[in-house]
Image (cartoon, rainbow, N blue to C red):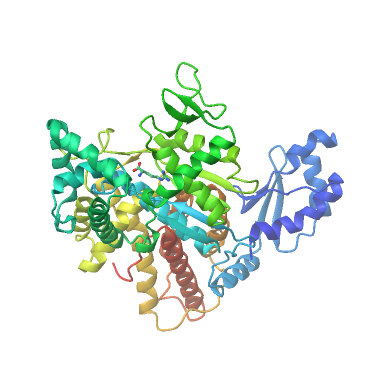
Amino acid sequence: MNLEALLSARLAPAFAQVAQATVDPAVRRSRHADFQSGAALPLAGPLGRSPRDIAAHVLAAADLAGIATAEISGPGFLNLRLTDEVIAAGANDLAADARLGVPRTTRPERIVVDYSSPNIAKELTVGHLRSTVIGDAVARLLEWLGHDVVRANHLGDWGTAFGMLIEHLGGGHAGEITDLTAFYQAARARFDADEDFRTRSRLRVVALQGGDEDTLRQWRHFVAASQRYLLAVYDRLGVTLGARDFVGESFYNDKLASVVAELAAQGLLRESEGALCAFPPGFTGRGGDPLPLIVRKSDGGFGYAATDLAALRYRTGDLGATRLLYVVGAPQRTHFAMVYAVAAAAGWLPAGVRAEHVGFGSILGTDGKMFRTRSGEPVKLAAVLDEAVARAAALAPSAEVARAVGTGAVKYADLSGDRMSDSVFDWDRMLALTGNTGPYLQYAYARTRGILRKAPTAPGPIRIIAPAERALALELLGFARVVTGLEESLELHRLAGYLHGLAQTFSAFFEACPVLKAPAGIRESRLGLCELTGRTLRQGLGLLGIETPERL
Ligand code: ARG
């Protein structure tokens, strides 16, 4: 049972009677009572009466069953406090519900989540962490809500860099490269220093794009080696991206010409300095000039934007997706806005189909600058995970738990802040056992499990006799509202914040209310609260992609 819905159902008929119109009672959780309705305030103008007067009439007309106290406060808010019986009944409903009160969507959509999407032949750095971790949580969440989620790892596997990489390999086998980053850097250094190498690299790109069999074979080895490496990292990170989710830029290669042709036929392209460009209205550069989206470069090659247009057309047209999510850093915001505008003009984003940029800020070091190694290099993701697990060993009883705690801490630190803000990479903070951290939540979960292991009896029906029990039950009943709210906003930090609040409320309950030492009857009720708290923490952290070890 959703308590907001219950209270809305009580108040709505009374509001309708007083206002002579349908009114949303706008019931929200409140610090001043359990819930509050502010719906009387905006009615004051239209009705020509004071909000307090309206609120008083609503209370007089409403069926207040299940409401212990209802008071008018301040300018005309309705402060509502539920009876303990209603809260206990709600908690028992949750205990019996595998979905913890969260309904499956009644309007399932096919949703493409484009995430991780690194440029391959380079090693993953912490820069890719955010897209991977945020995108994976978004995919898990939408899937759990009942949507048909298509994960899309839009690998950069078709750039000009492959010319230089294949030349540098010089006939060797890419599968034997042990350090892709070092290999890439060596190729890059040669490219910068050696004119002859540069020329050969460029010819290789032409050969690759022209479909030369030998070049393609070598390119395939590179892609395969990169994919193997990526899958190993995803596995370590506990990310749900698999081999079948790799749909790289190369996949769209044979669709680019028709994208350009379709756009041209609709009069959406213009030549500018030898390149074919779209100029979607409303996008201007620094000097106020229209900003181009380059669809075909002056050398005849297709670039990043053309591939994104082809991918979008494929996702809505061929896959039939009605929601497209692009989990990519904030600097690409304008790129995507322009791609969507051009796609909409071309008819590839019909009414009811949405494309959204799920942006995020950068990862900074504790000095407030971009997070880098001491020598100024981007930090490798694998090195971060190694260190996280090593540091977590101090908190964990086994290597397996250290892995869950270390990677969980890194992921949680990334997910618990507003994603549009920059996130500060701070080892001590992310691994702290107190505060809004992964380890704190995992510890709270393990504590619920520890109590249940020691209990001589099974959890029983929840009854409310102490204020701390009441507060915990009320908090547990808020899970559904938070999760449901994420479907549109994708503000994962709200779920993290909720779970942190739940863990704190649980901790206060545990201090105020003995569980194992409580008399029979009360003990089973409190065990019921422990069990429900554990399940909620586990489900919530699971949606964020964070494991919950049974012991810590
Ligand atoms: N490979 C790109 C990069 O590393 C990100 C790709 C994001 N997805 C997309 N459809 N453009 O910047």
Q: Position of residue 137 (x, y in %)?
A: 43, 56
Q: Position of residue 211 (x, y in %)?
A: 32, 49
Q: Quadrant of residue 540?
A: bottom left
Vertical side of 31 occupied by 91: above or below:
below
Q: Kindly identify the residue that appears in the image at 42 percent across and 34 percent down.
A: 296
Image quarter hosting the C terminus: bottom left
Q: Position of residue 328 (x, y in %)?
A: 41, 43
Quick check: 358 left or right of 183?
Answer: right
Q: Kindly identify the residue that appears in the image at 18 percent across and 34 percent down.
A: 198
Quick check: 362 left or right of 47?
Answer: left
In-front residue for pair 360/184? 184
Q: Kindly identify the residue that appears in the image at 61 percent across and 54 percent down.
A: 34
In-front residue for pair 444/420? 420
Is residue 85 among what the camera can see?
A: yes
Vertical side of 193 occupied by 548: above or below:
below
Quick check: 189 left or right of 366?
Answer: left
Vertical side of 165 occupied by 515: above or below:
below
